[in-house]
Amino acid sequence: MNDWFRIPSDLQNSYLGLIGLHLREAVIPVLVGLVVALPIAQLCVRLRWLYPPVLWVTTVLYAIPSLAFFVVLIDYTGQTETTVMIPLGVYSLVVFVPAIVDGVRSVPQETLDAATAMGLGPVRRYLQVQLPIAVPAIIAGLRVATVSSISLVSVGMLIGNQGALGNLLNDGQIYHQPRLIWLSVITTAVLAIVVDAVLVGVRLLLTPWMPRGTRKARPAPAEPVTEDAAR
Amino acid sequence: MIRIDSVTKRYPDGTVAVDRLSLDIPDRSITVLVGPSGCGKTTTLRMINRMVDLSEGTISLDGADITKQPVNTLRRSMGYVIQNAGLFQHRTIVDNIATVPRMLGWGKEKARARATELMERVGLDASLAKRYPYQLSGGQQQRVGVARALAADPPVLLMDEPFSAVDPVVRKGLQDELLRLQEELGKTIVFVTHDIDEAIKLGTMVAVLRTGGKLAQFAPPAELLSDPADAFVEDFLGADRGIRRLSFFSSAGLDLKTSPIVAVDSTAEQIAERTTPGVPYLLVTDLDGRPLGWSEPAALTAGSIDTARLLAYGRPFAAGKDSLRAALDGSVLSPTGWAVGVDDTGRVVGVVSQQAVGEAIRSAHAAVRPDTKAVG
Ligand SMILES: Nc1ncnc2c1ncn2[C@@H]1O[C@H](COP(=O)(O)OP(=O)(O)OP(=O)(O)O)[C@@H](O)[C@H]1O
Ligand SMILES: [Mg+2]
């Protein structure tokens, strides 16, 4: 049984260590992406004309292969986790910006009017009304961004031992060991499913105010885990 | 007092929503802005709390120009209630109501206590406190909206068609509740509606606006009904303005007849004794004195009156409390042409004929001025 989880020594990591690395490299950029996307999205809500160009920029950034990012970044950040995480963070913007903009815009005009009429200034209105009501949309975006980030981390193998479960997959190919390939693919898939389930739980906790049964449940994207590995 | 002084609002696209409007809105009473859709009611209301900036003229509150004080301070002194309530969907009812007190720095406990007190005031059960807005009916949400606006006890209440999204029965309940609350609280209320009946029922003063944001008439409702300023106002008041005007005359002066009334267990002698010359019918009541129906005296069998064969008695009016309109309505609805006056407990105090109601109406019209406030 334990043989199943034995990791080749060239990865310099245990099975659990690989999972930890993989999660860290997937989740941190998404969280940073979220923090960056919030003010950008708010700007887009306030200045309507800004939204289309911003959307265009995030889409173009998303279209840049991670390999291209690596080539540029490696001179500055070297063969580190940071080099893997920067493009992942950038990619997450393409999901977050529209998710937050739509979420904030979904706040009914009369709710905003009521807040204004009560003397809530723009900052209070944003923090106390718009943002909380946008939470379901933001978490829907967070789910998509996190799951795709988990699958994208694997490309870190292109710059050495930074691909976590991706390196495991690579080793499986080099050493002709199907066990390692299966282990990598299944573990990545399970990670994605578990993290997604956690996020669904977080949303349920944060939004007791949503009518039951009509929650805007957005199913996790069922993309094959290795699809983006060639980036 | 809120003084609107030759105020004009021109939107950036050139629409003139309000045109040189002047209104003196009296303290501690309900002033209604009424008019057809698009006539500038909402714009006027929103200029008062500066959600819309006026283009020309001035608005002052107790003599001070509203643009001279910080906008959020001004807004916190004015509760605002809108159609569909505009509740914060992510907050519980009690937290919705406590929003402004919390913002003003009240402690959590104090703000919640105030919210709970207000829920009772507006007729909401305390068990709803922990619910979220989606778990409430439209009428309940509207009550929460009113409670929320009252939370910090602002002297002014601005209401923009607050009751137009609920069904007529609930609306009537909310209107009655507002009048009752106003009696207790004495706020300066500016109330926007497009429903002239609502305006007449609620308003101490009614401002009728016409399309283009011009004032057509500003008067107490009774005066509006008796002396509409022009054809537009007359048209807007609708066809039965004469009947509606009767709402402003009390039924107190009606000469109620107490003789043609018999209890259901009456003997032949009692029936004979009660039969009144000139009154072809007798009103039969139950043993408590509540009306059961009309009958010709000859058709009554002493001792065991068959209540199933009685004529309907229409809708009784509260004698002395309801208006002549209710009395007239009662007499029109009754197949005998006689209206039944009852007291608070529903017991018959007397009956009155259509002719007598008509005479009362004529003498009321002849009197110098009708009451200024609607009765019943
Ligand atoms: N933001 C705006 N920009 C341009 N025109 C506006 C704006 N808001 C309102 N208007 C116009 O001003 C006029 C008055 O609008 P307002 O909302 O005050 O009417 P209202 O009397 O409240 O109507 P309703 O009974 O339909 O609510 C209308 O012609 C409307 O189209
Ligand atoms: Mg309006």
Image (cartoon, coloured by chain):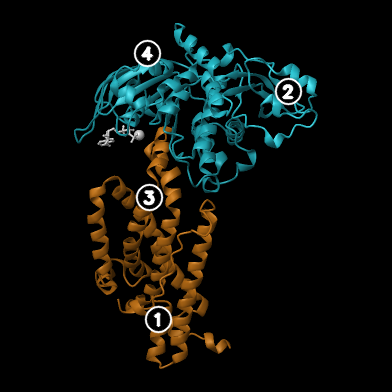
Chain colours: A orange, B cyan
Q: Is label 4 in contact with label 1 (beta carbons under 8 Å)? A: no
Q: Is disc 3's CB within 8 Å of ligand 1?
A: no
Q: Which chain letter matches label 3?
A: A
Q: Label 4 vs label 1: CA separation?
A: 77 Å
With respect to residue B373, does A17 lie above or below? below
First reached walking from the N terminus: tag 4 or tag 2: 4
Tell which of B231 and B180 is nearer to you.
Answer: B231
Query: In the image, which disc is placed on residue A167?
Result: 1
Which amino acid lies under the numbered mark 1 shown in the image of this protein? Asn
Does residue A108 appear in this view? yes
The residue pinned by badge 4 equals B63
Left or right, residue B154 beside residue A80: right
For the residue pair A116 and A226, the one nearer the viewer reads as: A116
Rendering coords of residue B41 (x, y %): 34, 29
Reading the image, the residue beneath label 2 is B262
- Marks 1 and 2, Cα distance to the nearest angstrom? 102 Å
**Badge 1 density bin: few <14, some 14–19, many ≥20, Cα 10 Å:** many
Q: Chain of mark 1?
A: A
In the displayed structure, would residue B253 be above or below residue A71? Answer: above
Relative side of B267 to B60, left or right = right
Q: Chain of mark 4?
A: B
Q: Which residue is mark 3?
A: A104
Q: Are marks 1 and 3 on the same chain?
A: yes
Quarter containing the C terminus of chain A: bottom left
Q: Please name the amino acid that badge 2 sits on.
A: Val
Q: Nearer the viewer, mark 1 or mark 2?
A: 2
The x and y percentages for residue B36 are 32, 31
Dot 2 surroundings within 10 Å: few (below 14), some, or many (20 or more)? many
